[in-house]
Image (cartoon, rainbow, N blue to C red):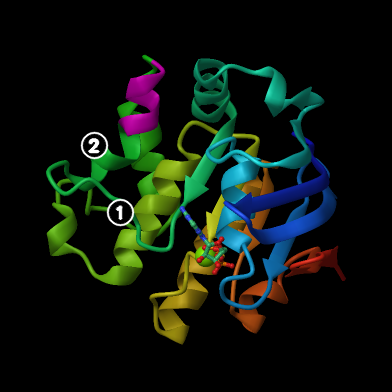
Amino acid sequence: MSLSVTGLGKRYGSSPVFSNVTLSVAPGEFVAIVGESGVGKSTLLNCMAGLDDWDSGSVSVNGTDLATLTSDQRALLRRQQIGFVFQAFHVLPHLDVAQNVGLPLMLLNQRDDARVQDMLQAVGLNGLGGRLPQQLSGGQLQRVAIARALIHRPALLLADEPTGNLDPTTATRVMDALINQTRAQNASLVLVTHSHAAASRADRVLELHADGIHL
Ligand SMILES: Nc1ncnc2c1ncn2[C@@H]1O[C@H](COP(=O)(O)OP(=O)(O)O)[C@@H](O)[C@H]1O
Ligand SMILES: [Mg+2]
């Protein structure tokens, strides 16, 4: 999966968020994006996933310009090729851990309980598949979210401050799970983070500003 963002600009009404954002991510590459709060990191990540619209420039995934796709086609692309991890977990409270992790496979009609068990083991949640989210710690919940984002083996993983709500020790374990699994699948990873420790593990670190993105 290659991702390319060219001259991207976004505003809400008359207030610009960012302009002139250009970056590309190679297959298997891990890019960290840092920047001040409110500069538009989440907005940029949402644009990369085709979850948000932009006002100028383009976003291409594997050479396909997202602007040429209908919203149904974008949804299918996400379901098949993209994983997304949010800061606030977004785990479904009424499903147990294994059901949460297996959900993307269900949506693709590719249920695979063995793969779910393997993934739980890989992120250090072995034996917790039958628990409900309310019975887990924050670090465990975030690993559920990571397992769910990777279970369908997406070529591109987008993660928005996935360790923002975690203590440093737990954050390190969660980052280990995220990086190990992304590397194992040779997926590209775009990580938005405030954490210097997390950013230092990336192949490249980019800083987002209102007038562009640079090293
Ligand atoms: N739906 C929205 N309507 C209007 N302004 C928004 C909306 N979403 C985000 N913003 C604004 O856009 C800017 C960038 O937000 P965001 O992408 O969340 O920044 P970051 O993730 O870097 O903290 C902020 O100033 C925020 O207030
Ligand atoms: Mg944000």
Q: Position of residue 90 (x, y in %)?
A: 32, 52
Does 72 appear above or below 155? above
User: Taking 173 as reference, is 197 left or right?
Assistant: right
Image point (62%, 62%), residue name: 41
Image point (22%, 54%), residue name: 128
Q: Position of residue 103 (x, y in %)?
A: 32, 32
Badge 2 marks a residue whose secondary structure is: helix
User: Taking 162 as reference, is 32 left or right?
Assistant: right
Q: Position of residue 113 (x, y in %)?
A: 31, 29
> Considering depth in this image, is 11 or 178 the residue closer to the camera?
11
- Sequence-wise, the earlier of marks 2 and 1 is 2
Q: Where does the C terminus fall, quadrant-wise?
A: bottom right
Badge 1 marks a residue whose secondary structure is: loop
Question: Circle 1 is placed at which residue position?
Answer: 126
Name which quarter of the figure residue 204 lies in: bottom right
Q: Are marks 2 and 1 in contact (CB under 8 Å)?
A: no
**How many numbered discs, if any?**
2
Image point (64%, 18%), residue name: 69
Q: Is residue 76 magenta?
A: no
Amino acid on which the number 1 mark rests in the picture: Asn
Report the span colored magenta.
103-108
Q: Main secondary structure of the magenta part?
A: helix
Does 87 appear above or below 144? below
Amino acid on which the number 2 mark rests in the picture: Gln
Does 184 appear above or below 161? above
User: How many other residues sit within 10 Å of disc 2, few (<14), some (14-19) or many (≥20)?
Assistant: many
Res. 186 in view = yes
Q: Position of residue 42 (x, y in %)?
A: 56, 58
Question: Circle 2 is placed at which residue position?
Answer: 99
